[in-house]
Amino acid sequence: MQTTLPTIDILVATTSGNTEYLADQLSDQLQQQGFTTRLHYEPIYADLVEAIDEQSYWLACIASHGAGEYADSMLDFATDLHAKNPPLDPLRYAVIAVGDSCYDTYCSAGRDFDHKLTKLGAKRLIERLEIDMSVDDPEKKASTWLTIFTRQL
Ligand SMILES: Cc1cc2nc3c(=O)[nH]c(=O)nc-3n(C[C@H](O)[C@H](O)[C@H](O)COP(=O)(O)O)c2cc1C
């Protein structure tokens, strides 16, 4: 049985800052529950992927931009991940996909990230949350989802 709460790496894909704000709120909520968090506003592939071990937990907050592309701050990371296809076996993770349902490519980047991590062997802790910026209250919806997420840790 695990006695200490795990450290959670929060990966942020943002272009205009909404997802960064959301990630900050979630980080605060996690810290209030006693978790240690590390926020990655521009996730570095080498720092994160090459450091994966049995204690690795990722919470990925991914906004879609362009035509379903990753938001700017994670474009390089996503490119590397798709090019290198590293085995991610010990990693445990969850994804919050941020988007707007007025786009045909609704939440495409977050969906892609979720599928890619699973395909590479990482373990999904909880079903992906999708936030529709045109209808949802992002902080409220994510906060409720986070309480379920933390029960998996
Ligand atoms: C130019 C542009 C393109 C977008 N493309 C998509 C898209 O393909 N799919 C989607 O679900 N949302 C799309 N969105 C909506 C964004 O995901 C949404 O505005 C989100 O809040 C942006 O998060 P950010 O501020 O963290 O970058 C787009 C928004 C803009 C401004």
Image (cartoon, rainbow, N blue to C red):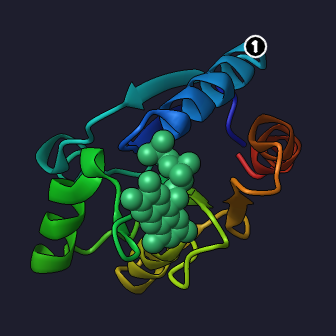
Q: Is residue 108 left or right of residue 29?
A: left
Q: Is residue 103 above or below residue 21?
A: below
x and y, in percent, of residue 141 in the image: 84, 46
x and y, in percent, of residue 37 in the image: 52, 24
Mark 1 sits on what residue? Answer: 32
Camera-side residue of 35 and 59: 59
Q: Residue at x 13, y 66 (%)?
A: 80
Going by the numbered disc 1, the residue's amino acid type is: Gln
x and y, in percent, of residue 32 in the image: 75, 13
Camera-side residue of 57 and 145: 145
Camera-side residue of 67 and 34: 67
Q: Is residue 82 left or right of residue 121?
A: left
Outermost front residue: 102
Q: Residue at x 35, y 43 (%)?
A: 15
Q: Is residue 58 above or below residue 33?
A: below
Q: Quadrant of the C terminus?
A: top right
Q: Is residue 49 above or below residue 102?
A: above
Residue 77: quadrant of the picture: bottom left
User: Could you tell me which secondary element the residue under label 1 belongs to?
Assistant: helix
Q: Is residue 140 above or below residue 58?
A: above
Q: Residue at x 22, y 58 (%)?
A: 75
Q: Is residue 131 left or right of residue 45?
A: right
Residue 6: quadrant of the picture: top right
x and y, in percent, of residue 133 in the image: 69, 53
Few, some or many residues within 10 Å of mark 1 (<14, 14–19, 20+): few
Q: Quadrant of the N terminus?
A: top right
- Image mark count: 1
Residue 55 appearing in the image: no
Residue 90 appearing in the image: yes
Q: Is residue 150 left or right of residue 17?
A: right
